[in-house]
Amino acid sequence: MNVIVIGSGLSGLTSAALMAQKNHSVILFEQNETIGGITATIEKDGYKWDWGQMLIPDLSQGEPGRKILEQLGVSDMVQVVKSYRENYFPDFRISRPETYRGIYWRKDYFKELFPENAEGLEKYYKIYDRIHDIMALSNKNDLLSKIKLFVKFLPLMRKKNWSAYELMEYCFPGNEKLHMVFMGILADYVSSPKTFPGLIIPTINAESQYDERVPLDYGKHEHRSSWTYIINGTGSLVEALATAAKKYNVEIKTNRAISKIRIKNGKVIGTETENGEVFDTDIVIASGGARELFLELVGKEHLSQEYINTYLQNLEITESVFMVHLGVDYDPSVYQNSAALCYYYLGYDIENTIKECKEGKYHEGEEGFLAYIPSKHSPQMAPSGQHSITIYTIAPNNPVNGTWENNKVEWAEKLLDIAEEFIPGLRGHEQTRIVLTPEDFRERTYLDYHAFGGTVPHLKVPPPPHKTPIEGLWFVGAQSENFGGVTGAMTGALDTVNQIFKD
Ligand SMILES: Cc1cc2nc3c(=O)[nH]c(=O)nc-3n(C[C@H](O)[C@H](O)[C@H](O)COP(=O)(O)OP(=O)(O)OC[C@H]3O[C@@H](n4cnc5c(N)ncnc54)[C@H](O)[C@@H]3O)c2cc1C
């Protein structure tokens, strides 16, 4: 078969390499000059940064992301390291203790802070363990696992349609601080606690993220997913997958935007580039934005109104980010318990923060930010003895209180003003700087509307499936997966390739 892949992010590269490994003839088109999409390495003056990725799930031995690298013969090219993250709140912080205090040390710590919620914390952590078991079992196909999964899920049946807010109220009624501890991460997704599925909350608050000494196997529980940093950044994953793609003879064409999917009688017959080149094909595997693909490259005339209503009209995607990369000649991690990553939450009103971002109000850093220092785990990402650090925060694509072009410099200074209240000396030690606005992200990803995390899990709105209504057209990548995600982009590509061969 002739296969065309659109996009050289992790989903496109994985799809291309896997299809070519099965001896199909694959051409991959990328509109940028360089491959890697949002996971390429950014370099300046000897410093390296990612486009914002930090902790990555499921890349350790035996886990789904690692298995794909092994299948493609490039596992040696990607090393990961376990570590921890910190969280700051206005009147307490979650800090990995120097001496290990056991799997549930955070629960004990929260009980000290909020003794009135001791019972609720027990309830939450029971649900936590159950959900993580269910997650692990849902990846297994044997009958016994399916039975176990059913039994595990039964006590949660009544809660299955609960929103994140309902789950928090059930566990910690009226305690906005504990709500923020577990729902703060929803700010990343710019997703309302009232529509985000409650039972997903424990999965995005894995205890091992806060302390790498928390084991992934304990008691009678199923194996928990690992969360790791990629040594030398996500660019090493891009390099590994590109190596595999080239090994299997994928032809990679950069600087080539696909502007049209050619369709005849409901079936894909080819693609057309922006400058009018036509390529015939049997299969197209497209990454990128759902609306961009279906409404622009395919065209409404090929889709039913029902498909448009279900998957495109109400598609829940995240907003964008505003990011400052710095190269500094000191170690800024001393202000965050030596952690590579710290989230600084500066308020407790998560619902309002999200609402305002969706309405286009850029908060100029006042609602919070995160600081990520990749050179902590990968010293090769900065000149010897120095550090690369990324400060960023959620931001609307189109701010109503200014434009990115006009305000970029001023807003970078404001974000750093706030960051320096917690990490003094950033600008005093600055050696180099790159500022990235949502416009830069839009340009890099070829999205009309940049969605930093792809599709948001929603109680009522599913992401568009990999198999599309057009025969031979398949959809992969961040907007085809709940959360998107580094490993999600790869495993979604594998599922798609498997489905193509089942079809
Ligand atoms: C700031 C930030 C932080 C993140 N943090 C994390 C994290 O900590 N952990 C985690 O697991 N995930 C994280 N993610 C998510 C993860 O990086 C993405 O979900 C994943 O990399 C998406 O891969 P992709 O292949 O779908 O998309 P992309 O990497 O966006 O690749 C799509 C490619 O397709 C190209 N393209 C699109 N349309 C066309 C066209 N018509 N013609 C030609 N080329 C086209 C684009 O140019 C682009 O190169 C983060 C993402 C961002 C932006």
Image (tube, helix red, strand yellow):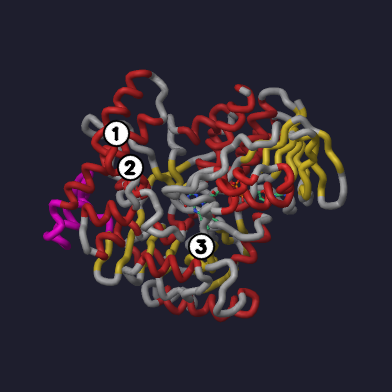
Q: Find residue 153 and name its label.
A: 1
Q: Find residue 269 and name its label.
A: none
Magenta stretch, residue numbers: 95-119
Looking at the rendered image, the quarter that the N terminus falls into is top right
Label 1, ligand 1: CB separation under 8 Å? no
x and y percentages locating residue 470 in the rendered image: 69, 36
Residue designated by label 2: 160
* Marks 3 and 1 close (CB-CB < 8 Å): no
Residue drawn 71% across the image and 36% down it = 284
Q: Is residue 493 left or right of residue 95?
A: right
x and y percentages locating residue 482 in the rendered image: 49, 45
Residue drawn 72% across the image and 51% down it = 296
Nearer the N terminus, badge 3 or badge 1? 1
Label 2 – label 1 distance at C-alpha:
9 Å
Label 3 – label 1 distance at C-alpha:
44 Å
Dot 1: within a 10 Å radius of its alpha carbon, few (fewer than 14), some, or many (20 or more) residues?
Answer: some
Q: Is residue 393 above or below residue 262?
A: below
* Marks 3 and 2 close (CB-CB < 8 Å): no
* Marks 2 and 1 close (CB-CB < 8 Å): yes
Residue drawn 38% across the image and 40% down it = 226
Residue 30 at least partly seen: no
x and y percentages locating residue 369 in the rendered image: 43, 67
Residue 347 at least partly seen: yes
Q: Is residue 465 magenta?
A: no
Nearer the N terminus, badge 2 or badge 1? 1
- Residue pushed farthest front? 305
Residue designated by label 3: 388
Amino acid found under the numbered disc labelled 2: Lys
Observer-nearest residue: 103 or 290? 290
Amino acid found under the numbered disc labelled 1: Phe
Residue drawn 63% across the image and 40% down it = 475
